[in-house]
Amino acid sequence: MSADLMRINANIPALQNVNILSQISDRIAKHQLRLATGKRINSPAEDPAGYMLARGLEARKRGLQVALDNVSNAQNILDVAEGAYSNIMDILQTIKEKATQAADGSLNTTQRSAIDGQVSALITEIDDIVNNTTFNDNALIDGSFSTVFQVGEQGTEQLSVSLSSADSATLGIDSIDLSTANGASTAISTVSSAIDTLAQDMRALGEYKVRLQSKESNLSNQVTNTESVRSTLEDADFAKEQMEVMKLQILQQTSLSSLTQANAAPQLVLSMFRQ
């Protein structure tokens, strides 16, 4: 007969089973928490190194996501500016057509004056477009817009953007005169130069947009890859956790059965005193 069984002041086998049962219950609770939260690491104590790495990766992902939002805002700003540039380009093309028309000797003074008035209105419209093209109360194409977009999670990951003015004075068309054939002829060359200048400005804007598109693609990939690594470190494997819970529940039941038997064993001692 076991020596532990003969000790009547302490039931050692029962105490051992209680300790084992407590450990199993704690392990079940840990796996059930993982199933409830979806995370393998719910506190630094579970995996200090993994917790630290996961927090660092989460911070990086959130920084990248904000940078991605910044890139989207920058693209919206450039889209607004591009739309305004395009409208002005259309007007310049119309003005050139009118200048070519006014330079023809078949027109009389009245007809040229009418064309000149129409062109003056178009030039005024160009300046109105410039004055009304804003984003968050910031004028975009009057020559004052120069800023730095934060396009990465690091302080050095920035894109400097400056947009050129497209008003009539900058383009050199504010004083063209189509009331005479000679003035109209000169205006053709002036407007052609303005078109070339605006085309260069739009080319520069296009280069900014190409860079932003590249950064957007790169940031999207970084966000996905960073989240993938964090998920591997921190997120729970539901199939594995459920399997562990089922295994531990079986052990819990067998431990309870064993505890019942351990509590019943001291009754054998009493049989020694029975007659």
Image (tube, grey):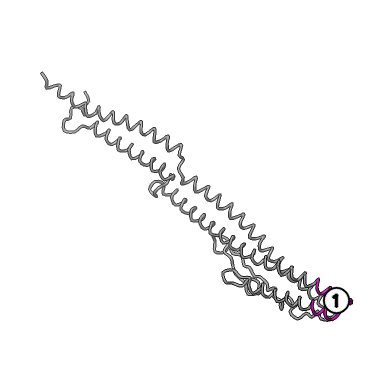
Q: Is residue 122 above or below residue 31?
A: below
Q: Residues within 10 Å of mark 1 (few under 14, many from 20)?
A: many
Residue situated furthest top in the rendering = 275
Q: Nearer the viewer, residue 118 or 39?
A: 118
- Dominant secondary-structure state across the stretch colored magenta: helix
| Residue 142 lies in the magenta stretch | no
Q: Quadrant of the C terminus?
A: top left
Q: Residue at x 59, y 60 (%)?
A: 72
Quadrant location of residue 148? Answer: bottom right
Residue situated furthest right in the rendering = 106
Helix, strand or loop at mark 1: loop
The residue that mark 1 highlights is 103
Q: Is residue 62 left or right of residue 145?
A: left
Query: What is the magenta range?
Result: 97-115
Q: Is residue 90 left or right of residue 212?
A: right
**Looking at numbered disc 1 in the image, what kind of residue is underneath it?**
Ala
Q: Is residue 269 above or below residue 37?
A: above
Q: Residue at x 17, y 30 (%)?
A: 7
- Return the x and y of residue 147 as percentages of the image width and height: 60, 70
Q: Residue at x 53, y 51 (%)?
A: 226
Quadrant location of residue 86? Answer: bottom right
- Return the x and y of residue 159 as percentages of the image width and height: 61, 65
Q: Residue at x 63, y 68 (%)?
A: 161
